């Protein structure tokens, strides 16, 4: 019976050992080899997961070096099985190197790209190879945009965009879903040249790249600056949403200008909440308050008012009558 043949991958090791032994005790020490175990095979986990307890020869047995491997020798990776599963992957190929490039840790979790960055049929980025954008196979969160979107193309398009930078993180910050939208900011909040907020980077105010309606005012407008300015303002809160309600057009209206209805210190309505008296939101900017309509009745109940105005023939329990009738135009009793 012929002797069983050794795996080809052991031949270089045996030759090295034989050479060392033939040189006698005076020769160099034999090479030290520490074999990997399932636990120490960390670059590609085989202690747990889909490849747990996999036999070394199943992946490396066809080669003379462990640097080479095949993914195609297992029935799970048969081409008839894998091809349909990758029908939507632009650069898919039934090839070991391609397998490892997309599955460096051996996992096969499917990615619903529609919730992250749409690449489906009909979208701007359809048909682009995964590796074009995901340049680091070990970390899919590293994304490259500038390989396709070159500076000579993008720079002229962004000449009016404050904070623009030709960098992949900045691209994703403004285009998280790959959309290209030109926003006329004037109907929302003035940022054009000459406005108080001109030249401010978009991401300074729009801190949530997935929701542009989330606006931060507090990074720039610190408490040390705004608190003293609002000492006489009733209902003041250092909250971004409240900032926008009172300053929807970036306007600053001081308490002293609230005439003829005075709300200065010492008057009846001093430090009453602005938003209680002016409860109506603007139709063009629902996030901002319309300071033209006003309400007196939320504080001045009907039973008390009716009793106090029994002798006034022109009395009506209406906010407009309270102020425009000439009785309480300045917020005081006649």
Image: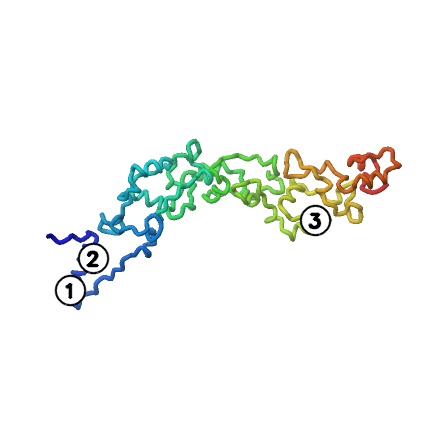
Local secondary structure at mark 1 = loop
The residue lying furthest to the front in this view is 1
Q: Nearer the viewer, residue 264 or 127?
A: 127
Q: Position of residue 113 (x, y in %)?
A: 43, 39
| Crowd tier of the residue under label 1, counting other residues whose Cα lies within 10 Å: few below 14, some 14–19, many 20 or above | few
Q: Residue at x 13, y 54 (%)?
A: 3
Pointer 3 residue: 230
Pointer 1 residue: 23
Disc 2 versus disc 3: distance between alpha carbons?
81 Å
State which quadrant residue 147 falls in. Answer: top left
State which quadrant residue 42 falls in. Answer: bottom left
Q: Residue at x 38, y 40 (%)?
A: 130
The numbered disc on residue 13 is 2
Residue 104 located left or right of residue 271: left
Q: Nearer the viewer, mark 2 or mark 3?
A: 2
Task: Say if 265 sits above or below 160 in the image.
Answer: below
Local secondary structure at mark 2 = helix
* Disc on the earlier residue, 3 or 1: 1
* Disc on the earlier residue, 2 or 3: 2
Disc 3 versus disc 1: distance between alpha carbons?
91 Å
Q: Position of residue 58 (x, y in %)?
A: 26, 48
Disc 2 versus disc 1: distance between alpha carbons?
16 Å
Q: Position of residue 321 (x, y in %)?
A: 80, 35
| Crowd tier of the residue under label 3, counting other residues whose Cα lies within 10 Å: few below 14, some 14–19, many 20 or above | some
Q: Residue at x 78, y 36 (%)?
A: 319
């Amino acid at each position: 019976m012929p002797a069983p043949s050794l795996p080809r991958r052991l031949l270089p090791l045996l030759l090295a050992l034989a050479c060392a032994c033939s040189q006698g005790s005076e020769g160099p020490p034999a090479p030290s080899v520490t074999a990997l175990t399932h636990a120490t095979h960390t670059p590609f986990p085989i202690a747990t997961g889909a490849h747990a307890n996999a036999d070394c020869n199943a992946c490396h047995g066809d080669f003379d070096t462990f640097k080479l491997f095949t993914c195609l020798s297992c029935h799970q990776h048969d081409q008839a099985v894998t091809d349909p599963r990758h029908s939507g992957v632009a650069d898919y190929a039934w090839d070991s190197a391609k397998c490892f490039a997309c599955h460096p840790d051996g996992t096969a979790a499917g990615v619903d790209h529609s919730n992250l960055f749409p690449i489906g049929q009909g979208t701007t980025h359809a048909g682009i190879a995964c590796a074009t954008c995901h340049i680091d196979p070990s970390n899919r969160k590293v994304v490259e945009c500038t390989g396709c979107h070159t500076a000579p193309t993008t720079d002229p398009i962004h000449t009016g965009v404050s904070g623009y930078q030709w960098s992949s993180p900045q691209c994703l910050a403004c285009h998280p879903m790959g959309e290209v939208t030109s926003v006329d900011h004037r109907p929302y909040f003035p940022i054009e040249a000459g406005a108080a907020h001109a030249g401010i980077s978009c991401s300074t105010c729009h801190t949530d790249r997935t929701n542009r309606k989330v606006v931060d005012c507090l990074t720039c407008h610190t408490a040390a600056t705004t608190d003293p300015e609002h000492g006489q303002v009733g209902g003041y809160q250092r909250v971004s949403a409240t900032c926008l309600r009172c300053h929807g057009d970036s306007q600053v209206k001081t308490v002293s200008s609230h005439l003829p209805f005075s709300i200065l210190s010492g008057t009846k309505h001093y430090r009453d909440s602005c938003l209680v008296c002016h409860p109506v939101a603007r139709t063009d900017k629902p996030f901002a308050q319309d300071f033209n309509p006003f309400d007196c009745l939320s504080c001045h109940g009907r039973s008390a008012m009716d009793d106090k105005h029994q002798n006034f023939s022109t009395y009506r329990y209406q906010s407009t009558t309270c102020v425009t009738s000439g009785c309480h135009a300045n917020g005081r009793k006649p």
